[in-house]
């Protein structure tokens, strides 16, 4: 199995005595150490208007991280295309790919948080159409050999040359967040890689991989389990008390996410993984919190479901020294048992 990181950083507002950059610096140092420990990649979120100081300028943060690392793949998970000028985003992403020596993994999505669409004054009903148009422009911008123009519903560009070129040709790999069967089949049909969310149960993960694999084979392409990345929250600890405390932190964070995703009529958009039901039960089914042996058991269930690529999110540790220790223990006590273990075929 292959392992990367998934997550965010926090730069909260404060007075003169409060260092708002501390959370970002800790995040960079955490990722630098992860590279040294043998992790393959890091995927960073994009969120706005939360009040929690989450990452909003994802490309900027990854560019800084790219300058501090040599081999770590730099992923976005995800850039929400309905909010972005596609040409400006294509330029920024290409600059990151070029400066990092071709390390960008371009993760994209339609978005799901109502408060973000409301803040940008973008109707959620337009998300899919905006996503499709923006992606078409970005791909054209990265691959066109001559100036081009675009006249769409949401964007117009006249006789433009988009620069710089990307290091990876014809363009960086596209990773798309999806959860419904229709969306997963569409991602596979387009030939893009698949990002699965951190709250889906192992059974739902297995179903999603089977759908993606079947559609990939139907398109005449070879099956590669590394083209599906599954996110899992993790925290390595030994005591039940420490585990329960971390689980409560994760549950509180999930409830905040659901509130941000709830529309005025009460409809809850749970995110790309569409994990529904009792949040506490969803939390228990999806998180990898506990001893190294407990986490290994959870990973074995994912491997049996066909998972080959796992992105771990250490938010449950609370960050700081405790998060760094959890990462080290995962690398030392869990990762070696799975580094060479092939995933089982998803049927």
Image: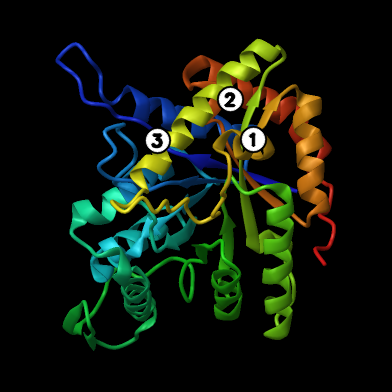
**Residue with the most extreme front position:** 265
Instruction: Using the rendered image of the protein, determine whether residue 67 is visible from the camera's viewpoint.
Output: no
Residue for badge 2: 247
Q: Earlier in the sequence, mark 1 or mark 2?
A: 2
Label 1 and label 3: CA atoms lie apart by 17 Å
Give the x, y percent position of residue 226: 68, 59
For disc 2, the neighbor class at 10 Å (few under 14, some 14 to 19, many from 20) is many
Which residue: 39% across, 80% down?
143
Which residue: 26% across, 74% down?
162
267 or 323, nearer to the observer: 267
Which residue: 20% across, 51% down?
119
Could you tell me if the residues under marks 1 and 2 are in contact, i.e. CB atoms within 8 Å? Answer: yes
Residue for badge 1: 287
Could you tell me if the residues under marks 1 and 3 are in contact, i.e. CB atoms within 8 Å? Answer: no
Label 1 and label 2: CA atoms lie apart by 8 Å
Could you tell me if the residues under marks 2 and 3 are in contact, i.e. CB atoms within 8 Å? Answer: no
* Residue 99 in which image quadrant: bottom left
Residue for badge 3: 256
Left or right: 125 as drawn, with respect to 224: left
């Amino acid at each position: 199995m292959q392992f990367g990181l998934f997550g965010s950083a926090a730069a909260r507002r404060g007075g003169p005595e409060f260092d708002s950059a501390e959370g970002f610096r800790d995040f960079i140092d955490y990722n630098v150490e992860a590279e040294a420990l043998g992790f393959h990649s890091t995927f960073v979120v994009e969120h706005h208007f939360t009040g929690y100081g989450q990452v909003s300028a994802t490309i900027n943060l990854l560019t800084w991280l790219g300058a501090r690392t040599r081999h770590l793949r730099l992923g976005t998970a995800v850039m929400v295309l309905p909010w972005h000028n596609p040409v400006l985003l294509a330029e920024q992403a290409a600059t990151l790919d070029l400066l990092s020596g071709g390390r960008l993994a371009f993760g994209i999505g339609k978005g799901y948080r109502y408060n973000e669409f409301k803040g940008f004054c973008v109707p959620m009903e337009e998300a899919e159409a905006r996503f499709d148009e923006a992606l078409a422009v970005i791909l054209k911008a990265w691959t066109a050999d001559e100036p081009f123009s675009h006249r769409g519903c949401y964007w117009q560009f006249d006789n433009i040359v988009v620069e710089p070129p990307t290091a990876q040709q014809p363009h960086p790999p596209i990773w798309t967040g999806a959860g419904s069967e229709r969306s997963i089949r569409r991602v596979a049909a387009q030939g893009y890689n698949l990002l699965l969310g951190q709250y889906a149960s192992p059974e739902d993960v297995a179903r999603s991989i089977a759908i993606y694999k079947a559609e990939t084979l139907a398109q005449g392409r070879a099956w590669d389990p590394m083209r599906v990345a599954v996110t899992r929250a993790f925290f390595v600890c030994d005591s039940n008390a420490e585990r329960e405390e971390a689980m409560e932190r994760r549950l509180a964070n999930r409830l905040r996410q659901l509130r941000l995703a709830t529309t005025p009529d009460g409809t809850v958009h749970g995110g790309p993984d569409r994990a529904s039901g009792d949040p506490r039960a969803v939390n228990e089914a999806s998180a990898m919190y506990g001893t190294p042996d407990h986490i290994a058991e959870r990973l074995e269930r994912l491997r049996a479901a066909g998972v080959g690529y796992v992105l771990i999110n250490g938010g449950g540790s609370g960050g700081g020294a405790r998060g760094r220790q959890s990462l080290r223990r995962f690398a030392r006590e869990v990762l070696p048992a799975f580094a060479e273990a092939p995933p089982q075929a998803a049927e």
